[in-house]
Image: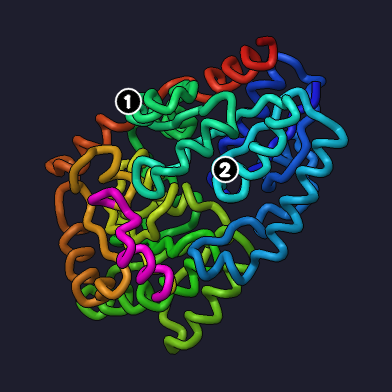
Amino acid sequence: MRVGIVAGEASGDILGSELIRAMKQVDDTIQFEGIGGPLMIEEGCQSFFPMEILSVMGLVEVLKHLPTLLSIQKSIVKHFLKNPPDIFIGIDAPDFNLTIERKLKKKSIKIVHYVSPTIWAWRTYRAHKIAKSVDLILSIFPFEVDFYKPYHVPVTFVGHPLATMIEMKTDTQSARQQLKLDISAPIIALLPGSRSSEIHYLAESFIQTAMLCHQSNPKVQFIVPLASNKTYQQFETILKQFDEFPIQLFLGQSRLVMSAADAMLMASGTATLEALLLKKPMIVAYRISAITHWILKTFKVMKIKYFSMPNLLAQKQIVTEYIQDDIDPVAISKEMLETIGQDENDSEMLVEFNKIHEQLALNSSQIAAEAVFKLIKK
């Protein structure tokens, strides 16, 4: 059996690796090929291109890389039309994957899209394109199932693998010991994102926030996990502009770094879900190019009140959000210091985090694998 599979970023690499492992437990002769990150490759996926090439966010940013992205897209389609797989699985990255999926489906290749595009948030018109492009959506959030019913798109809610991989209670002390951090010091983790564009737009504001926190409380320590050598060097270069302000950087190990922290300042994205599951207080920020933001705001593209994953899942504000010009290091630093001074056991945030964790904690990869095998047999 051959499975085509394409993931476009670190979160998709996690989902893809878990799905590959679950499917191989049923049949260890299955071949996986397409585009994947280090975790998928470790599970035996043959990746034709580096996954990092697809990790581009924002309308303007995508335009800069469009020729390369279109070339890769065309190459993937050509390969799978020439060598049809038993099934094709696109993991997230909808703008890249849906075009591939639509072209492959026209040739009667069965299509699964893992992680619903956020059409309930913006660009709802994509639902019609999805209906023409996929045979099955594997949804990681429960509210998405009802959303697709009017469009007659088959959806299976699988929960999120992270919810079963992460324990209900986080051992902060153990994480600090593993990272050789001070067990008693207040620690704030900065997570400016896994993409170069996110580092570009957020790193400086995050470092400024850390400096203000440090001025008010010199005991506070700061740690930063970076997803790749490229983003590590990028952040390190920006940090050098601040007279060697003491921030400890880690290559990878994001979950361990988050586990070790008392609170976090984070870019919006899948990492906020991971922080939620680790039961860590957080402030979420996001910034994109001015032109992209103007387009989204002017044409009222966004359909949601909140943009961070915890607030979307709770359907109310449980974490503070800062976006674009509202990202104010002074305000954020003040709130961050207040957050690490609170008793987390009395937090409404913690109650909501536990509730969401229980809701998402299904045997996601196994459910997803069963749904894929069922579609193949059908």
- Give, as a three-letter code, the residue at label 1: Gln
The extreme left residue here reads: 346
Relative depth, front residue between 119 and 247: 119
How crowded pointer 2 is (Cα within 10 Å; few <14, some 14-19, many 20+) is rated as many
Residue at x-position 28% and y-position 75%:
325
Across and down, in percent, residue 181 comes to: 43, 59
Q: How many marks?
A: 2
Relative depth, front residue between 259 and 193: 193
Q: Is residue 64 left or right of residue 324?
A: right
Residue at x-position 52% and y-position 73%:
235
Res 113 → quadrant = top right
Residue that mark 2 sits on:
12
Is 4 placed above or below 27 here?
below
Q: Which residues are drawn in magenta?
A: 290-306
| Among the two numbered marks 2 and 1 on one chain, the one whose residue lies closer to the N terminus | 2
**On the rendered image, what quadrant is the N terminus found in?**
top right
**On the rendered image, what quadrant is the C terminus found in?**
top right
Could you say whether the residue bearing mark 2 is in a helix, strand or loop? helix
Across and down, in percent, residue 290 comes to: 39, 75
> Are the two marked residues, 2 and 1, in contact with CB atoms closer than 8 angstroms?
no
Could you say whether the residue bearing mark 1 is in a helix, strand or loop? helix
Q: CA distance from mark 2 to mark 1?
A: 21 Å
- Give, as a three-letter code, the residue at label 2: Gly
Query: Does the image show residue 213?
Result: no
Residue that mark 1 sits on:
359
- The stretch drawn in magenta includes residue 304: yes
Across and down, in percent, residue 365 comes to: 55, 24
Is 240 placed above or below 327 here?
below
Please give the label number shown on residue 62.
Answer: none
Relative depth, front residue between 134 and 343: 134
